[in-house]
């Protein structure tokens, strides 16, 4: 019997660390879904690596909804790994910079993780210990194992 390839999704992966994570996951035998907000750049990066591409702007709830719908359609079996890499480190500091940073680096992670949990759920409970974020710490593996009452205590990305 052939072992099933594990499936990983990486956000903000058209360049930088996200792109390299995709490359290394692929080299370790994962099927990789590379996501990026700029479709042209994301598609080119995915093509170069020979992995799947799905557009995703982590700041846009409609974009997360489209990702969820696509995952349901193409990968109903669920994900093994989610790398919430998309993030910003902007110059200067004012209200706009603060809002963009928090909305991307914190709420962006929540939107993606909540969306993925909503659509696919954990494929294997233990695998959700592998949900990782480069720019914010909010992905607790216990979310996936939580009872309904405990799950309601998980932070929400609805603002
Ligand atoms: N490099 C470091 O030393 C370091 C240290 C600590 C933490 N980090 C964190 O690690 C992560 C990756 O770092 P990096 O150096 O590779 O950063 P990077 O080169 O600036 O890449 C950031 C990636 O996030 C994407 N992104 C930004 N906003 C997004 C959004 N709203 N939706 C989807 N994608 C979005 C960018 O897309 P575009 O190309 O469209 O802009 C880009 O692909 C970031 O979260 C960063 O904060 C990095």
Image (cartoon, grey):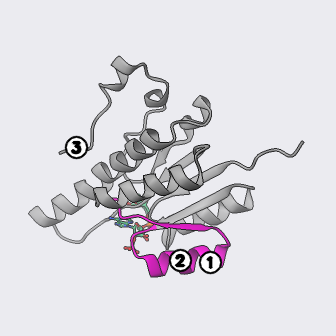
The earlier-in-sequence mark between 3 and 1 is 1
Q: Label 1 crowding class (10 Å Cα cut-off): few <14, some 14-19, many 20+?
A: few
In the image, residue 131 lies in the stretch drawn in magenta = no
Secondary structure under tag 2 reads helix
In percent of width and height, residue 55 lies at: 44, 68
Residue underneath mark 2: 43
Relative height, residue 51 to residue 74 (above, below): below
Secondary structure under tag 1 reads helix
Residue at 49%, 73% (x, y): give it.
15
User: Does residue 111 appear to the left or right of 118 in the view shown?
Assistant: left
The earlier-in-sequence mark between 2 and 3 is 2
Relative height, residue 74 to residue 142 (above, below): below
Residue underneath mark 1: 47
Hey, which residue is sitting farthest left in the picture? 95
User: Does residue 35 appear to the left or right of 48 in the view shown?
Assistant: left
In percent of width and height, residue 79 lies at: 58, 46
In percent of width and height, residue 108 lies at: 32, 53
Relative height, residue 45 to residue 137 (above, below): below
Q: CA distance from mark 2 to mark 1?
A: 6 Å
Within the displayed image, which quadrant is ligand 1 positioned in? bottom left
User: Does residue 101 appear to the left or right of 41 in the view shown?
Assistant: left
Q: Quadrant of the C terminus?
A: top left
In percent of width and height, residue 26 lies at: 69, 61
Residue at 29%, 25% (x, y): give it.
153
Relative height, residue 43 to residue 72 (above, below): below
Magenta residues (range)? 36-58
């Amino acid at each position: 019997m052939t072992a099933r390839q594990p499936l990983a999704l990486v956000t903000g992966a058209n360049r930088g660390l996200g792109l390299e994570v995709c490359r290394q996951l692929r080299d370790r035998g994962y099927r990789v879904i590379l996501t990026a907000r700029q479709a042209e750049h994301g598609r080119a990066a995915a093509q170069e690596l020979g992995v799947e591409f799905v557009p995703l702007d982590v700041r846009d709830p409609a974009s997360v909804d489209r990702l969820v719908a696509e995952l349901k359609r193409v990968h109903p079996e669920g994900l093994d790994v989610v790398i919430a890499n998309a993030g910003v480190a902007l110059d200067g500091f004012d209200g706009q910079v603060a809002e963009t940073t928090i909305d991307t680096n914190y709420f962006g992670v929540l939107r993606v993780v909540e969306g993925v949990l909503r659509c696919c759920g954990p494929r294997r409970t233990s695998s959700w210990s592998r949900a990782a974020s480069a720019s914010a710490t909010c992905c607790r593996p216990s979310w996936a194992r939580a009872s309904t009452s405990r799950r309601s205590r998980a932070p929400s990305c609805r603002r």
